[in-house]
Image: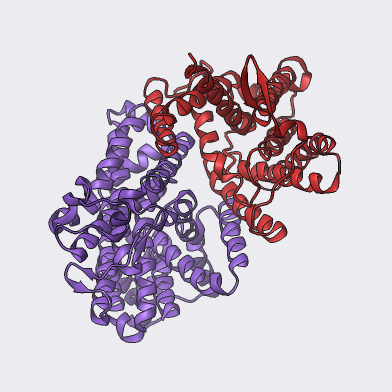
Amino acid sequence: MDMLFPQIVAGLSNGSILLLAALGLSLTFGQMGVINNAHGEFMMAGAYTAYVMSTLIGNKTVALIVALVVGFAVSGLLGLLLDVALLERMRMRPLDTLLVTFGVSLVLQQLARDIFGATPVYASAPEALTNPVTVFGYSFSAGRLFIFILSIVCVAALYAVLKLTPLGRQIRATSENRDLAEVSGISTRTVDHVTFFLGSGIAGIAGVALSLLNSISFNFGTTFIVQAFLVVVAGGVGQLKGAVIASFVLGLCQSAIELPTSASIGQVAVFLIVVVFLQFRPQGLVSIRSRNLA
Amino acid sequence: MASKKTVSGGASASAAGEFYAKYKPWIGTAIAVVLILLAPSVMSVYNLGLLSKYLCYAMVAVGIGLAWGQGGMLTLGQGLFFGLGAYVMAIHMKLSDIGPGQVPDFMAQYGITEVPGFWELFRNPVIAVIGVAAVPGAIAALLGLAVFGRGVRGAYFAILSQALVAAFSVLLIGQSKTTGGTNGLNDFKGFFGYDLTDDANKQMIFYICAFLTLAMVLVVWWIRRSFMGDLIIGVRDQENRMKFLGYNPASIKVFAFSLAAMFAGIGGAMFVPVVGIISPSDIGVTPSILMLAGVVIGGRTTLLGPVVGTLLVRFAETQLSEAYPSAWTYIEGLIFILVIAFVPMGLGQFKGLWPWIKDRLGIGSAGSVAAAAASASVASAGDGGGDVKAAASASAAVTA
């Protein structure tokens, strides 16, 4: 038990990081079939926002809260711009968006390198988040605890928006049956833009939060993007529930395998788990039942 | 094919056109062979080495053209197969450099006194040569059977292929005791007994690269005009209909994907003697997607587009990335953004342009057979051959 408990905590912490990174991705992938390769760079934009705020604002706690809001707006607007300028014209060929957004990610990385330099920077965290906290006699990293709570808050907020607001109803309608939504008087075009704004904005929040644990550099996003994609694939497209379960299961698996072996074996194992899992459920963990052949 | 030519001009022109249409593949091959044989006499050894490197990437591109352009499988993980081929070759070259009973320097630093089993396997040159194609081909077939068999396709497949190459490079770095880690394998002396510093041998390696690329193009050309080519396109466009007709889409896809993986493996294997190093940074997630750049530019569905596009992109990279490293990354990004968003078929999109201009200007009714043959070679752009071939010779001239 003494061995097991810290390992579960590490797994849940890894899972919450994966979840934050994958949440926005899952939303946009589910609704538009757009695989946003620039999602990692939207996270990077959030992380640099945290860095800029921590240099501008003296009080680190205020800086973090401001960064969360501004980071959401910055990344959200980047996403909106991407959707309006490029992705909208590619609705009929979603697979190609993967490559277009890869181009965007290259450009954004180079922009970051030109603006902030190639050397990594750090966003100084609030005092309270740098010290370990002790719960039930176990000591946790406060930063990781904060990320865990934030990921739950984000999921809850997104769930509430999707279930309770008229906007959420429109988003769900569009992602479940685009044509029917359109003939019911929903402007799917507007809904797409809003969804992309939301999904990218969550990437910004993820970036701000993860800047507490990692140094910030131009390739900040590449650390997370591949695993975030795997979470989306394993969880099932566009399913909040699937993304949540997949993140935590993969996070727990990874920390369980990493302990006796090494971090690199852990990552390879996570990949193999996903491939084997897709043998049994090719549509992912949670999928919308339909009579469609595709 | 012939019907397209008969519209252009008088009797002699159409006769030449028919001659061209009938023997087009042979003419194209002959031109390519002449260009390859001439290249060493007009290029410096250094430029020849660069061209050899571009050709290694072109081999990967030919495979991507087959898997993605024809088969609709967007593979973002060709770096894996490129890397497998390259590491098999690098292991063999390292072992033959140091001789039996010895271990490479980096292993000695870790205190390893005996080379591991998967190294020993590739000491035999015959096994190594087979291995550079067979290992990637087998891994691709295994993966393909697993994912295509269960109907995983499109974006899902793209993401899995990307994750696979990410896992591979993580594994290479993590297992540095037997793979050389981030440094990779480098500092090779010989290539199957030939001294790598000798200019004559560099020329020989260029010939190997060039003729391998040509052979791959011919294989893909042959597949495209065979029944298998129709099946591959059928699976790309109407997978369910193919299933109802009684075909197994998975096995057709596995065939195309494995062949693409073998091409990538061979390209990777030649990369090692040409460049002299293979490391995880050559095959990670980003390098793997960049292997698509030339295919995107050249036109994914054309036969020669991937080769021409790759040669162009890599040439531009060499020219620009040293002088303006930051500008080059922007250009690379913009290639993906602008070409995919606005010109999705790349250079292949312009194949109808020349006949249209010719029609407007009223040329193409020239009397002499030679002139007609020349115009026919571009008029045949209808099936994507002529203009790209012209571009190929142009790019070869530019590289010189």
Tell me which residue sits at (65%, 32%) in the image.
Answer: A24
Question: Which colour style is shown?
Answer: by chain
* Quadrant of the snapshot with the C terminus of chain B: bottom left
- Asked if residue A9 is positioned above or below residue B13 in the image, the reply reads above
| Foreground pick, A92 / B245 | A92
Tell me which residue sits at (42%, 41%) in the image.
Answer: B167
Q: Residue B85: x, y in percent?
A: 29, 53
Q: Quadrant of residue A278?
A: top left
Tell me which residue sits at (74%, 29%) in the image.
Answer: A187
Q: Residue B184: x, y in percent?
A: 37, 57
- Asked if residue B290 is positioned above or below residue B153 in the image, the reply reads below
* Quadrant of the snapshot with the N terminus of chain B: bottom left
Can I make out residue B129 in this image?
yes
Q: Residue B399: x, y in percent?
A: 43, 77
Q: Residue furthest bottom?
A: B41
Tell me which residue sits at (86%, 43%) in the image.
Answer: A58
Chain painted red: A
| Foreground pick, A291 / B351 | A291
Chain painted purple: B
Q: Quadrant of residue B170?
A: top left
- Asked if residue A41 is positioned above or below residue B351 in the image, the reply reads above
Q: Quadrant of residue B143?
A: top left
* Number of marks in the rendered image: 0
